[in-house]
Each structure stands twice: as C-alpha cells, then as structure tokens.
Image (tube, rainbow, N blue to C red):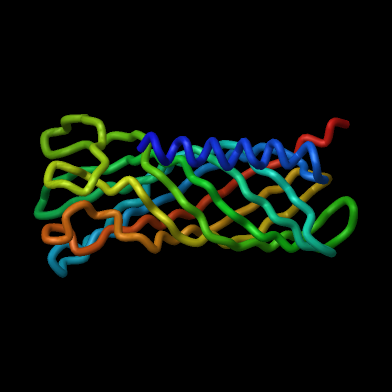
Amino acid sequence: MKGCIKSGLTILLIMALTDIRAQVKPGYIFGVNLSTVTLNAKGIISNPETPAGIHFGGSFEIPVTGNFNFNPGIILSAKGSNYKIDSVDFSLSPIYIEVPVIVMYSFGSDIIKISLFAGPYLACGVGGYKIVAGGELTKINYGSGENSDLRSFDAGLNFGAGVNIRGLLISAQYGIGLTNIAPETILFSEMKNKVIGISISSLFTGR
C-alpha cells in the first residue's frame, strides 16, 4: 500500500517539475461516483446495488498537437457496492488513490467546447470500510491472503465526454476495471470495479 502511495506522489512530483519546463497547466477535479463491484462467486453472479461516492484531486493539461491534450492526474476516489446474498446484506466501500492517464480531444469555439477523452488508469486501495452481517462496521483489509477483503491493485479504462464552458469542464465518464480484485479465487471467482463518474474540473490559469 505504501508503495502505491509513493508511486502516485512520484508521478505528481514529476508532473509538477514538468510544469516549470513546458506549457503545462495544473488544475483540480471534483465529482460524484456511482459505482459497483461486480461479484461472481463460484459461478453465481450477484446484482449489486450502486451507492454514491466522491472523487477529488489534481490534474495537468499538457498540449500535444492541434486539438489534442494529454491529461494525467492523481485523485482520491471512493467506490464500492451493496450486496444481498442468501438474504444476508453486506457492503464494501473501498477508497483508492487513482492515477488516470487521459488523452483528450476538444473542438468548438473559445466560449464553449466539446471534449472527448479516453485512457487507462492505475489505482491502489488505501482505505475504506465494510459492513458485514449484523451491521458491524470494520476497515477493509487489502491483500491476497485468506483474511483479506480485496486486492489493493486495480487497473482499467476510462472514457467519456464533457462540455467546456470558458475553462470549466463538466464531464461524465465510465470507468471499467480490468483487474480481478478478489483476494481468494477459490471463494470469489471474479470481482471488478465499474464506475460512472460526473465531474467538474478547471485549470489554474493565473488570471
């Protein structure tokens, strides 16, 4: 877990240093997640509920060519799901440090632009909680062993679209996890993150 945090901070530091040497614009991002963690246990596929969470962090805009920009970032993202299996309710609410690597294409006028974007992400679980039978609230234990709840590492793809109004981007995106985050493949065949995100972001232009 500490290694994931260090890696994310290292990426952020590299981007910050790049800002000194190139035309890189830092900014912020804040929004809401509607997430599920799909669960396929021993061939039985559950239908998880979709709770709401938040995400926030920083991003950088790096001009590439023409209407294309490179937009890496680092955000804190709350995900999870609520389940009911064999009349037993439980929930998982993991928190990730996520590093999205986005390529964005924008077109339109100086006042309003349409933006389309896509790219991979890497994520590391750093916190969160679970509610088990009886309503007991405990912290999520990350790892791959018998007593673990989720694997800490996740990777996937993000894609979406937005409207940029005078530098304020309002966007919607879909993130699909490609990594099985189940700690025990014998008990859990497969668990993957799926997230619909609605975000507001802007760049610090210094104006």
Near-viewer residue (4 or 172): 4
Where residue 170 sits: x, y (%)? 68, 48
Q: Residue at x 53, y 47 (%)?
A: 99
Quadrant of the frame with the C terminus: top right
User: Where the N terminus falls, by quadrant?
Assistant: top left
Q: Nearer the viewer, residue 192 or 4?
A: 4
- Residue nearest the observer in this picture, 170 or 17: 17
Q: Is residue 73 left or right of residue 20?
A: left
The quadrant holding residue 114 is bottom right
* On screen, residue 27 above or below 177: above
Residue ID at (77%, 42%): 25
Residue 112 coordinates in the image, percent (x, y): 83, 54
- Identify the residue at horizontal 60%, vertical 61% (top origin): 160
Residue 22 shown left or right of residue 129 in the figure: right
**Is residue 126 shown above or below 60?**
above
Residue 207 left/right relative to 68:
right
Q: Position of residue 35 (x, y in %)?
A: 40, 51
* Residue 156 coordinates in the image, percent (x, y): 45, 60
Where on the picture, by quarter, is residue 60? Answer: top right
